[in-house]
Amino acid sequence: MSTANSTGAGKLYGVGLGPGDPSLMTLRAVEVIAEADVVAYHSARHGRSIARSIAAKHLRADHVEEPLVYPVTTETTDHPGGYQGAMEEFYEASAARLAAHLDAGRTVAVLAEGDPLFYGSYMHMHKRLADRYEAEVIPGVTSVSAAAARLGTPLVEGEEVLTILPGTLPEEELTARLAATDSAVVMKLGRTFPAVRRAMEGSGRLAEARYVERATMAGERTGVLADTDPDSVPYFAVAVVPSRVGNPGSVPSGPGEVVVVGTGPAGPLWLTPQTRRALADAEVLVGYTTYLDRVPVKPGQVRHGSDNKVESERAEFALDLARRGKRVAVVSGGDPGVFAMATAVLEVAGQAEYKDVPVRVLPGVTAANAAAAAAGAPLGHDYATISLSDRLKPWEVIAERLRSAAQADLVLALYNPGSRSRTWQVAQARELLLELRPPLTPVVVARDVGGPEQSVRIVTLGELVPEEVDMRTILLIGSSQTQVTERADGSRVTWTPRRYP
């Protein structure tokens, strides 16, 4: 009956049994159990094993059974290494017991609920034994698939993203991850349920969340998560946020609103979880076409792109939609409050006809922060942010602010330095600053930070070539204290000390 390899040792199997219903075991799982000399399974100290109960009708009298009894589950322990130390000692001892059978040439099947390598106890045996013995893992139906099947609703569709989370994560981490994904399953409930429920509420997902307990087992229960009694929730339960595609009930309801969001300096890597949630919840996206193109297309979501010179009209359009009950996200680059759309929206929202329309502003990573991080830490001390665009304010005002900031010895972050229609401003700014700063002052020339054409160079104010600066560039002009150092790999970084002499 045993399957020994060329060294005479037995073979190790991790056998996935599925979510609980014995009829959901795979044919291969049944075959492996039939071939095994030894059947091992985990259990709590009460001795009952869910894994054994699932496979019970396939066990024979001549099977050697190895119950692997946890020393602790949720209770405290006086082990000198604490809970983790007690569990590590248990896994080492369990692996040694199985190794003794394998050394004797016996085939060992370790039973696992669901899938052996999906939050399963078997993986602790696999990590300790698979490098010494032949091992094979038999996959099983997971509780995630079982829960979706019992709810009878799609889990993910099309290009939606599924996130699987343990309920034992810190509540703030759960909230952020739930906010940033399309669909989700939270496992390991039981005592974690109150925190999971709060995380669902904090991320705006509570209304769409569903509850599944002991899927496919006796005592199965499904329902709405918000209506579930926390005191009734066992460990073997999951919270499910299903697919939104074709599921109108999953979309937030309520009055219209405008949310102004910042997408950061480039693509999806720069989005915050809060911004991802706002973009997913919106019925309509409004914004400059270049920024809208950074946002993934979602079925059923309407997009209105426009030129970058119609900010007031764009804001009014978004507020009109919200007044008619639509949830609108106004998409901005960087941070919406830094030379971007938040001001335009709030200015129009101050008009009498829009005062009842809710407006929220969500922050984003600024171009200055992104450029500074790419170059080192030039904004490590006091700095001023100034736009060189004279489309909305006279150049005389810009020049006076540049002069004042330079005289105050502030690092300067210069936005909107040049464009096809504005070609002289950088040269004028350079000449003005050279009157107040030495030519060796460090300057970061950062273009398309975070994008496919990213270029970050550290030059001096005297070396700065205005013709090389365009609208996709931001300039960081150092103070008298800003330093440039060379790293061991030959790269150069710039930084401004936090201490001032």
Image (cartoon, rainbow, N blue to C red):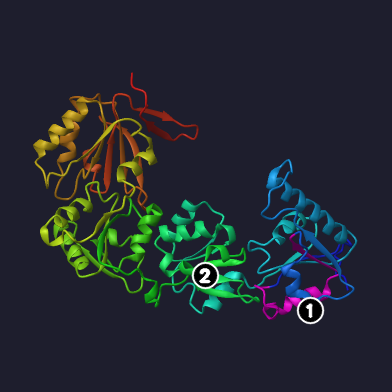
Cα gap from disc 1 to disc 2, whole angstroms: 30 Å
Q: Left or right? Give the position of 413 relative to 142.
A: left
Is residue 15 among what the camera can see?
Answer: no
- 46 w.r.t. 88: above or below: below
Q: Residues within 10 Å of mark 1 (few under 14, many from 20)?
A: few
Residue 398 image label? none
Quarter occupied by the C terminus: top left
Q: Position of residue 338 (x, y in %)?
A: 24, 46
Kindly identify the residue that appears in the image at 83 percent across and 54 percent down. Answer: 96
- 331 w.r.t. 213: above or below: above
Q: What type is the residue that disc 2 sits on? A: Tyr
Residue topped by disc 2: 211
Please report contact status of discs 1 and 2: CB closer than 8 Å, yes or no.
no
- 425 w.r.t. 273: above or below: above
In depth, the one of 162 and 371 nearer the eye is 162
Q: Position of residue 306 (x, y in %)?
A: 20, 63
Circle nearer the N terminus (1, 2)? 1
Q: What type is the residue that disc 1 sits on? A: Lys
Snapshot quadrant of residue 356? bottom left
Magenta extent: 18-44
Q: Position of residue 393 (x, y in %)?
A: 11, 43
Residue topped by disc 1: 57
Kindly identify the residue that appears in the image at 16 percent across and 44 percent down. Answer: 389
Q: Residues within 10 Å of mark 2 (few under 14, many from 20)?
A: many
